[in-house]
Amino acid sequence: MDFSFSEEQKLLKDSIDRFLEKNYSFELRQSMIDERQTMSAEVWQGLAGLGVLGVPFSDKYGGFGGGGIETMLIMESLGNHLVIEPYLSTVVLAGGLVDRGAADWQKQIILPGIIDGTMLLSFAHAEPQSRFSVNHVETVAKPDGSNWVIEGKKSLVLHGPAAEKVIVSARTSGEMNDLDGVSLFIVECDEEALGGHEYPLYDGTRVLDLQLNRVKVGPDSLIGPIGKAMPLITEIIDRAVAALCAEAIGVMDRTHQMTLDYLKTREQFGVPIARFQALQHKSVDMFINLEQARSMSVLASGSLGFSSSLERSKAVAAAKDFIGRAGRSLGQEAIQLHGGMGMTQELAVGHYFKRLEAIDVMFGNSSHHRREFANFDGQDNPVEYTQPRKKWKQI
Amino acid sequence: MDIKLSQEDEKFKNEVRDFVANKLPKDIARKVLEHRHIGKEDTGRWHAALFKKGWAAPNWPSESGGAQWTALQQHIFDEEASIAGAPRLSPFGINMIGPVLLEFGTAYQKERFLPKILSGEEWWCQGYSEPGSGSDLASLRTQAQLKEGKYIVNGQKTWTTQAHWADMMFCLVRTGQEGRKQDGISMLLIDMHHPGVEVRPISTIDGGNQEINEVWLQDVEVPAENIVGEEGRGWTIAKYLLSHERTNTAGVGASKRELAILKQIASSETLGGKPIIEDALFRDKITKLEIDLLALEWTVLRVAAVEANGEAPGPEASILKLRGTEIQQELTELQMEAIGPNALPHLPMSLEDNWIGPNVGPKYATPLASRYFNYRKVSIYGGTNEIQRNIISKRVLGL
């Protein structure tokens, strides 16, 4: 057992931290959000230049072959600077689905584009009625000759407005909540039959609700084997949850630090308010939450490589529950300790708090993951996802 | 970064598991798992089994007869032994005064005391708190005056756990009145069998067996060679002692055992014809606690791994006692909640292993209320949780 980072991992984290420190001010972030931008193209190119967008992918496609721990370090940095850019959507979610699920020729088209920052993708999985259920897929894809016709609704497609393509989950057989019968398709966002609208979330993330009005796609847009995508989707969502947990650590760490700084400088009754024991104990409780959350983030990211998907999903669910609760408590106390200033749009602390709240909701809130965790008891290992060996013919 | 145990540590874990399965006396394990009283004789037998194996002192160096385990190995041992129903050894000799004597003791003190701590032949207690000195320990008033090669000690200690079992007490006394109140404190090793030492039991709200005592000291003569370190260095030594045991204070192994017992009880108790563990409300309380315990366990592992690398523990080490005790208390609370009205009967005599009277309610239920009340102590002893927060606020957060 070893919780230390390698020299390469430390360098990776340092280089992102330095880049964001220099190029990603809170003011820049707020002006993007005010101007309804999903992201900054310059920042994205900067991250591509550092190689950050290629970290999880094989060097065969121009990546660095990193694992869960590398993604954890990146996400922590992004959280620390409250970055709104679509790393989770493009690299972790869509990139993960392509990397683990797609045929080699598809990877050759897509992964280099992700890595050099020229291709933005998103994952359209959640639906208006699915709440937090990963299995709930009502969107249908029906064969039409050698093509597929997709019909249905997808909601909360993260960073969707910036995406060039979305990966859509659709049912090719079975009933609404069946584990079997779900397939993945790549859909171009400029498709005529793709309707929808974009809007912001309270944390500044911009999203899409999509209406697929009989969108026709070719056979080459299918990712992975027909009807067998659910184990892959579960695996990639576990990765996304672990990534969000890591991001939350970055957010919590900075929130705690900002609060300590405020307590040391703000004076009332003629002394810095850091002198008051009631406030000291609240700060300690924030610290306790932060350190335990950090342990759980390490557990989640470290377990992504486990051979048992049950063990992996259980660790990830525990982490998401704990970090949801710890993040909320820490965020609420940060606002409380900032007093009236914590309520203002002007100060960063409120925006950090809102990101923690958004992270809790994304891909299942604390209560959802606690329920999942309890239900894992006594379950058998589910079917594992195996990468397709079939080589598709290019048309 | 690798969150799995190394092969070597896996091997160690199996070795511990085998040893505990073969050498932990079955009657003791049963008493622990059923929450019956564990007496001095029980604790002594387990100590003797560990001593024979060379495992009595996990953290002492091997040249002093210790196992010299890494922090991670100590954690593994604690977990395996606790889950199997091993009682906690008396901490005062092995975990507390032992490491202090190894660091500050004279050659005479090491030779005189360490072997008998290791073998379990001599039992120790800790003379710190006084009626007027609790959290403000440095205000202690027990006097020690040097006269003709002997300290004459007068005063009173209180909350002294296992004083009624102990042969020796390491005791903080006032040897000087000048300067800061911390500077006049010394540590003496006092023979509990000496004339002038009187142990009076304190009854506690759990209504169970004697645990804590007052220790009255009247003209007790202590040989000058029994001072640890120099006169006036007692406070520094006491602080060293507090900083020494970190990972063990979390009690993760014992809490895992209690969580398993909680789940068993909640599977037996019914609500509307169904086991209460299937009740959504109760199940959620258990799940939340299980995940909280997991977060503590992984924090302990982080701390242990850092120590194993030979580095000083990070700030995360300071939260272990706090969270460990909070979780221990929640476990007793939920166990008591699980049994509903069966928590009400108070039959302390039924906690003795030789009790032959009737049980009221299920056998597992009888001890739980007493345990719940007893466990309110854990957030008070060893520095209250509020004092722990003060320390973290000052030392870690710089407030």
Image: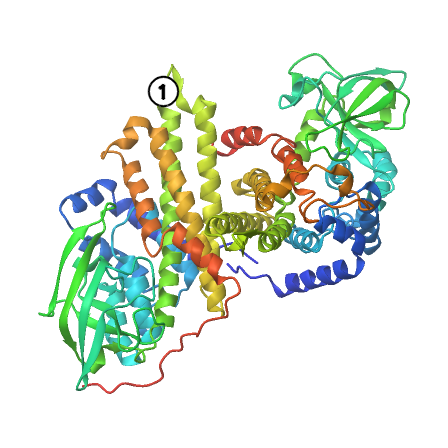
Q: Pointer 1: what residue?
A: A267
Judging depth in this view, the residue of B376 and B253 nearest the camera is B376
**What x and y, as percent, mark residue A147?**
18, 82
Q: Residue furthest top?
A: B178
User: Measured from the top left, where is residue A124 in percent x and y?
Assistant: 24, 64
Which residue is pictured at 52% across the width and 40% down the height?
B315
Residue B148 sits above or below residue A103 on the image: above
Chain under label 1?
Answer: A
Residue at position x 56%, y 39% in the image: B326
- In the image, residue B323 above or below residue A211: above
Q: Secondary structure at mark 1?
A: strand
Give the side of residue A155 with respect to residue B217, left or right: left
| Coordinates of residue B231 in the picture (x, y in percent) | 76, 22
Viewer-nearest residue: A185 or B264: B264
Q: Along the line of sight, which residue is nearer the eye, A13 or A235?
A: A235
Q: Where in the figure is residue B123, as x and y percent of width and height?
A: 83, 37
Residue at image point 37% right, 66% down: A234
Left or right of residue B362, residue A131 in this image: left
Q: How many neighbours does mark 1 have within 10 angstroms: few (below 14), some (14-19), or many (20 or more)?
A: few
- Tell me if I can see residue B399 in this picture: no
